[in-house]
Structures are given as C-alpha cells and as structure tokens.
Amino acid sequence: MTIFALGVNHKTASVALREQVAFTPEQLHQALPALREQTGVAEAVILSTCNRTELYCHGATSTDMLLGWLAGYHRIPLEQLREHCYAYQDDAAIEHLMAVASGLDSLVLGEPQILGQVKQAYQFARNQASVGTVMERLFQSTFRVAKTVRSETKVGENAVSVAFAAVNLARQIFAELPQSRVLLVGAGDTAELVAQHLTEHGVQQLMVANRTLERAQVVANRFQGQAHTLGELPELLPQADIVISSTASPLPIVGKGLIEKALKERKRRPILLIDLAVPRDIEEQVNELDGAYLYTVDDLQGIITENLRNREEAAEEAKVIIAEHTEAFSAWLRQLDHVDVIRDYRQRVQQMAQEQLQRAHNQLTSGKSPEAVLQELTQRLTNQFLHQPTQLMREAGAAGDDLTLAVFQRLIADDE
C-alpha cells in the first residue's frame, strides 16, 4: 500500500489551468466518492484552493490512474494535464503535504491561510468516511508539524506583502492600534487585504473612501466600516490617525495642502500616511510637514525584501523539522505493514488449524480410532505449515537468492 500526492499549483500551471482543475465545494460532494471508487484507492483527501489542486491517496493504485481520473473528471486532455502535474509517493508525498501545510510551498512563503485550508480538506474527507487509519495519522502528524514549524522557526514572521507590511508598520508606530481610526483611500484588492489585516489586529474604526460609493460600501460592509466618496476627503482626513492609500489614480489625490489643513484641525496630533499606489497617491511634499509621517511602497519594499530573506533562512530550519517527522511517520507506516503481515499470517494458521481440528472431530464422531485421528491430524498440519515455506526455499535456491535462504536459516536455527 502506497501514499500518493498528485496535483498542480502556482509553480507548475497557469491560472487558467488551475481554474479548470479546481473543485468547488459542491463538486467535492460528488468527486471525493468518485475518487474512492477507483481501483485500489482505499483512502483519499482532495485539497483545492486558488493556488493548488492536489489529490492525497492511500492504497494500491498508481500515479497514471490518479492522473487519468483527474483529467477525465474535469474533461482536460490527459497529456496537457500531465505536462503541468507533479506526483510524489511515500516519503516524498508525506514530506510534500507537511511542507504545504507549513506554508513552505505557498505563493507567499510562510503564509498561514493554507493550514486552515488543509484542515478543511481533511475534515470534509473525514465527514465523507474517506479517511481511514493511515490518512488520519498522516494528517494529524502534519498538523503537529505545521504547529511546530510556526512555534520553533520564524518562517511565518515578518511581513512579505505590501498590505501586511503596511499594517505591521502601523502597529509599530501606534501601540494601541485597535483604538486608532483608519482611513483607506481606494477600495480595490489591496485595500480589501489591508482592511482584513487591520480587522484581525482589532481595528474597529474604519473609513473607506473610493471614487465610486458602491465599491466603498462593499469593502466597508464586509469589515463593519463606513463608506465615503473621494470628494469627502477634506472632512475625513482630520478624523484619521492612519491613512493607507491604494488607488489607480494617475495623479496624486492627497496633496500637501489637504494634510496641512488636517493637522491644524487635529491640533497637531500626528498622522501616519502609507502610500501603496504606483504612481503615488500622496504628494511627496507631505513629508515636509511636522506631524505627518509618509511611507511609500518603496520604503515597504526594503522591509519586505529583508523579511523574505529571513523567512527563507527559517524555511531551511523548517525543512529539517519536516524531514524528522517524515521519517517518524514512515517508520510507523513500516511497522503497520509488519503488523498486518503478522496478523494475516496468524489468522491463516489459525484457520488451517481449525479446519483440521474440525476434520479430526468429525472422524472421532464417526468411530475412527483416536490414535489414527491424532496421527493424521499431525501429518496434515505438518504438510500444510511446511508446503509454502518449502516451495519458497526451493525457488530461492534455484534463483541463488541467498538473502531469502538466510532468513529461513535464521527461522529454523536452534535457539541454543
């Protein structure tokens, strides 16, 4: 029985192909049982996110079968999918899953969201009775590894996206960030990600100003903020402790004069301004004002580059942890295989003994002498127990298989 991992991700496939092989939550209800029905698949988990779709299986199946099933389910030419797929078995598959859950295989190294997505995939498969002894142990081990990586390395520390870096900068300057009033200028994807990070750090006073009020309302409603138009900036800026701007405007929309006026109304209480836009949203001359602290995307990029280097160093430490846990799980799996062999052998011997005992009992009932019955019982059991080992030893001798012969020699050796 083998553990398989097969899939595509942001490194191997385009967005278009990843969209084709992704599973919606509705599709998973049908797809997971369909995968389990494939020959040799004993257990299965499907992980599907915007950046990856992966099949994790345990059984006597094959990579080609899993690849064919994935291509057939999504009606994608097999060779097209094969070109962009990766496949791992046993130790490599175990190590890959642990690396994925620990954020080492993510688009943003060390991002924490993937662990939650792996847990959701496992829980869904478990609810569908698609997780057995091996997958249960594998995923529980994986979750422990991811926790260890987070606690014992710095792979998840330090900002490596401009949105996260902006919020981290705000946290450093405003110790009581949850009590700060934040103004987002713009309501695109970056602004939405900033709002998410701010909310996660306890910010409750959020204003969103955008060219169109409808889009501002979408972001504001999601994070319990207030929606405004850009025309309201003169009234909003004096209320803001932190201004984070990320519009697509070709010209600056926040000038030195606006900030100077805002500072006067704030009685010189400082304002932190973070400009994530390219071209700039906020005039560079704002930095000339006392009480105005302006950071641009270039300032943040230096922080991000250094932080990414630190994460990469931490990732090497994480790989050592993953390798250790991979070996530990593989050792357990090998032991499980031995237990299965021993159990099957004992059951087979017990079955043979019961069959011969029943035969002897029937002979005694029919009047055959006990001495003859015992002699025949002994002869039959001896023949049955020795038949297959004798045949294997003859085959090993003919093939020059000294290793197998040595095992048998050790088995029959006198303990003394």
Image (cartoon, rainbow, N blue to C red):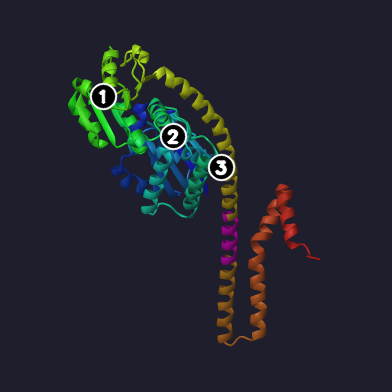
Q: Which residue is mark 2?
A: 111
Q: Which residue is mark 1?
A: 238
Q: Position of residue 386 (x, y in %)?
A: 67, 64
Query: Which quarter of the figure has residue 325?
Result: top right
Q: Secondary structure at mark 1?
A: helix
Q: Residues within 10 Å of mark 3 (few under 14, many from 20)?
A: some
Q: Amino acid at mark 3?
A: Asp
Name the foreground residue: 413 vs 185: 185
- The reply to whether the C-beta atoms of the residues labelled 2 and 3 are less than 8 Å apart is no
On the picture, is 79 further left or further right than 266?
right
First reached walking from the N terminus: tag 2 or tag 1: 2
Name the foreground residue: 275 vs 307: 275
Query: Which quarter of the figure has residue 228?
Result: top left
Identify the residue at image location x=43%, y=41%.
115
Q: Is residue 111 above or below residue 291?
A: below
Residue 8 seen in the current view: yes
Q: Amino acid at mark 1?
A: Pro
Q: Which residue is mark 3?
A: 91
Alpha carbon distance from label 2 to label 3? 24 Å
Which region shows up in magenta?
336-347
Q: Position of residue 89 (x, y in %)?
A: 53, 41
